[in-house]
Image: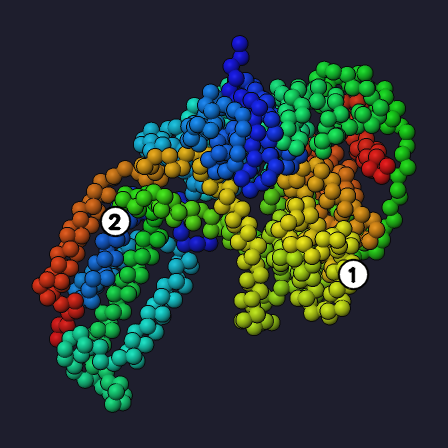
Amino acid sequence: MNNFIINLIPGETFLHKLSGTTKVRLFFVLIVYLIMSFDLRLIVPVLILGIIGLISLKPKLKSVRYIIIFVVVMNLVNILLYYLANPHLGMLYFGHETIWFQFTDHYIVTYEEVWFLLSRFLKMIASFLISLDFILAITPSEFAAGLYSCKVPYKICTIVEMAFRYIPDIARDYQNIKVSMQARGVELDPKKTGLIKRIKQNILILIPLVITSFDRIGNISNAMDLRGFGKGKKRSYYSEHGETPNDRKVKVVYILLGIFVVAYIIGRVFFNVSEVWYPF
Amino acid sequence: MKKPVIEFKDFSFRYKSQTKETLKNINLTIYEGEKVLLLGPSGCGKSTLAHCINGLIPFSYDGEIKGSCKIASLEIVQSSIFQLSSQVGTVLQDSDAQFVGLSVGEDIAYALENDNMPREEMIPRVYESAKMVDMHEFLNHVPYDLSGGQKQRVALAGIMHDDVKILLFDEPLAALDPMMGNDAIDLIDRIYREQKKTVVIIEHRLEDVLYRHVDRVILMQDGQIIADMTPDELLLSHLLKDNGIREPLYITALKNAGCQLQPGHISNVYDIDLEPYRQQLIEDFQQTLPSQPQQQQEVVIEVKDLSFGYNAHQNVLEHVSFDIHKGEKIAIIGKNGAGKSTIAKLLCGILRPTHGQILLKGQDYMQYSIKEIGEMIGYVMQNPNQMIVKDMIKDEVALGLMLHGYSKQEIDENVEEALKMCNLYSMRNWPVSALSYGQKKRVTIASILAMKPDVMILDEPTAGQDYRVYTEIMTFLDQLNKEYGITILFITHDMHLAIEYTDRAIVFSEGTCIGDDSVFKILSNEDIIQRAHLKETSLFTLAKRIGLPCDEFTEHFIEHERMNRHE
């Protein structure tokens, strides 16, 4: 039934067993850290950590393989387009160019350009790996609890949680409606109908899906009201366990990292610290 | 002196969007520790009354309130839904929607979370509540792995924490198969006794609720309370028949035999004293009724040694074989996951067998596309809202024909005929949204009939419907079958439906066909009843207690009922 890579029940590894609060905070700090620069000295360690993290989570290879391949390929295409759009980015970022070889007058390949595109690519992959680790390590309830610990109002946290709860139900409704429409003659076989027609046919399925989903939302909101949702300003979370020794260790890491991020950004804004690094 | 916990005094309610009052002048008192059944057909106002008890009115539904309603001494107009929800625990009809947590534990904890209770206190209390409903070993399970009955148990555990005084069950049987339904009624009874709560059950299935003792039955009709009496008194009266509620089958059987019912323990088929009626029942049974001999017609569908699996390792269906003859009415029975809907999808060609054959009128159906099969076999879903895509009735009925590329003239002819068959012709230009549930169901059936299929498959055609709509839908289908010779397959776990409206039952359990025989024979086979999650009907119990053969007794009863219906 549940084919997503999202877990609903926490797993058994080190990362899984951290509390939601720790996971969410660590994730935010790392993402800001990765966004703030193109400096490979900063990116590569996180990339390596991301790979170690992924292996430690012992994901089912089958479920993550496609998404990894997809993201890597998309990013390769992305940097190729980047290059095609402007082959002189190296000049822009580093202020100098050393030609490696040349296709045409316009399309030259410089060492600086390659270095910049490599940094960019690794930055994207590192961000992806950190996000994938995060998704694999956290349950939606822990995510809600973690967001709540970052002072996000719990009504917003709950929307996130609810979405995960009901996606499979809606997917099942969709399947059912699809079956009945197919039996009535809606052709969804890609070999027999064109894309435009197929999109139109899918819209036919969406109408009853939206209507049944609205019915469901009414019932859900009643169920929530009846059990006191929205009663107080504060709320606690069943799925959020207290701080373990491991949580405390990771907390030290993300606090130090957070201080570094703030310092680096201040450096960038006020003291002209470069966002890129070119060793040669 | 008994203490009242629910007190309605000259209470009326009108929804903001409606012109007429939904509840009219309600006077009702329910005392502490009572177990009360709130009975009535759909649209009688019983759900609205429940909303007043649990505080959804006026919190979520706006409207005009007159008179007074006090729940545990709180006047509903002056209290918040949160005050009320700490007094009244509600188990909703849709146990799937009520399951808001992502695991059993979380769902049970939901109310405590909203109370901002620290986790350390929460955990033992969740365990305790789960234990009360025997779900303590499932705390880490996700909702998708649970059966309807288990979800309902979780819902019940989730409202037991605070010192709720009143437990309110809104149609607890609607989504359950017969065996789970019995378990649910048992569980409610046990919690009622152990926890000493006041229990209010809202249902229209009288017989199933009376499986366990109920102190009082309150019958509603058109927004008013028309009876407030013990179950025995109610069964002795004519109120049930007059108000579209199904009498327990054994009571009808006794009445059919001409027995004058005597007061005393008649609300339970196991307790009722049968001595005064025995002679009359036996005499009536020995009278033969004119039965209609059925002639076997040609075979329309032949399923031969069919197996199907979504992957190579596991088969969902294994070695299933059966024939379907023209004009038959067949019930396909089995608990959830037994393979009922898979067989329907296979027959429609949406799935194809991994092994074995399906022959349509003697031709291997692998040569046909889904679309072509759709002209021979029509499939009607359980929930009409999941099928209807057009605004106008006429357009909805024409949709299938248009998709199949019929000419304008053919479409018009077929649509007109289908609408006439379904008594919808006069409404052909109405918007679908103006229709009632039963009418929408008819529209979906008409939209399938327009394709002129030989066979129709209906998935739970009467689920969640009260006796009146149920009878309306089933009588209509019966007519289609008789007058137009359409073969109908019902996927159902409603045993009343199977008994009264079908000739034959094919029973599935764990992917195999475990029975294919007349409904009466199937339902007198205890092994099949167990494995397919059915339960013994009260007719069987009655026949057993009298010492008559169960299947023949039931058959006799059905003939009698059919005669009554035609009169």
Chain under disc 1: B
Residue B361 badge: 1
**For the view shown, which residue lies furthest in the left direction?**
A271
State whether residue B304 appears in this view. no
Disc 1 element: loop
Residues beneath discs 2 and 1 located on the same chain: no
Output the chain of dot 2. A
Q: CA distance from mark 2 to mark 1?
A: 65 Å
Give how far across and how far down residue B176 sits, in percent.
Answer: 60, 37
The x, y position of residue B113, in whole percent, is 37, 35
Picture residue at 51% right of the left edge, 51% below the top:
A170
Residue holding disc 2: A25
Residue A163, horizontal then vertical, whole percent: 43, 49
Return the residue nearer the eye: A228 or B73. Answer: B73
Could you classify mark 1 by the number of other residues whose Cα lies within 10 Å: few (under 14), some (14-19), or many (20 or more)? some
Give the residue displayed 71% in from the left and 38% down from the top. Answer: B468
Q: Position of residue A94 (x, y in %)?
A: 15, 75
For residue A7, side relative to residue B374 (left or right): left
